[in-house]
């Protein structure tokens, strides 16, 4: 086989072109800080990078859900604390109302305080003389 000047020239040019392409690829990797810049560089590493990216996105969603759940539990604890306080206050007032030595003014103040718990007076004998289970009008009950 004879080696011509043209063949030597083509081989040298091919080597220079390949070296230049490799140099450009290394320069791109260094500038981006990534070993895999195209999926064709390393298909396995590229697929692992995609899986990692998806896992990170999922973890971010879980963190956000955890934050919302924590806020909701905190709100529910606050509401339960307020309800517990209201029930304890109502129980104290009920025990106090059972005192037989209360004056009319004391009973009136208890009735006003009771309005805050239920939205209206609920003291027995509060001006209503009928049967509380009877209806004055159809569908209206006391």
Image: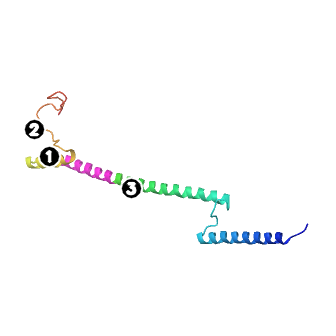
**First to last magenta residue range:** 78-101
Secondary structure beneath label 3: helix
Residue at image position (35%, 54%) is 75
Look at the image and tell me in which quarter the C terminus lies: top left
The image position of residue 82, as x and y in percent, is 29, 52
Q: Quadrant of residue 8?
A: bottom right
First-in-chain label (2 vs 3): 3
First-in-chain label (3 vs 1): 3
Q: Nearer the viewer, residue 136 or 43?
A: 43
Residue 34 visible here: yes
Residue at image position (84%, 72%) is 5
Q: Is residue 117 above or below residue 31?
A: above
Q: Nearer the viewer, residue 96 or 53?
A: 53
The residue indicated by pointer 2 is 127
Q: Is residue 93 above or below residue 32?
A: above
Asked whether, in this view, residue 78 is left or right of residue 117, the answer is right
The residue indicated by pointer 1 is 111
Look at the image and tell me in which quarter the N terminus lies: bottom right
The image position of residue 87, as x and y in percent, is 26, 48
CA gap, disc 3 and disc 1:
37 Å
Residue at image position (76%, 69%) is 14
Are the residues flagged by discs 3 and 1 in contact, CB closer than 8 Å?
no
Q: Is residue 99 magenta?
A: yes
Q: Nearer the viewer, residue 5 or 40?
A: 5
Tell me which secondary structure the magenta stretch mostly adopts.
Answer: helix
Q: Bin the neighbour count of mark 3 within 10 Å (Cα to Cα): few under 14, some 14-19, many 20 and up.
A: few
First-in-chain label (1 vs 2): 1
Residue 71 is tagged as 3
Residue at image position (31%, 51%) is 79
Circle 3 or circle 1, nearest the eye: 3
Q: Is residue 95 magenta?
A: yes
């Amino acid at each position: 086989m004879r080696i011509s000047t043209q063949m030597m020239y083509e081989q040298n040019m091919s080597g220079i072109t390949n070296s230049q392409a490799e140099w450009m690829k290394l320069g791109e990797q260094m500038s981006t800080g990534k070993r895999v810049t195209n999926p064709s560089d390393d298909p396995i590493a590229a697929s692992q990078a995609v899986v990692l990216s998806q896992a990170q996105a999922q973890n971010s969603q879980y963190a956000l859900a955890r934050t919302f759940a924590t806020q909701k539990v905190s709100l529910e604890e606050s509401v339960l604390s307020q309800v517990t306080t209201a029930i304890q206050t109502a129980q104290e007032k009920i025990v106090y109302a059972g005192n037989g030595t209360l004056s009319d003014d004391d009973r009136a103040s208890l009735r006003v305080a009771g309005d805050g718990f239920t939205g209206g007076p609920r003291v027995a004998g509060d001006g209503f003389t009928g049967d509380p289970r009877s209806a004055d009008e159809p569908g209206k009950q006391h």
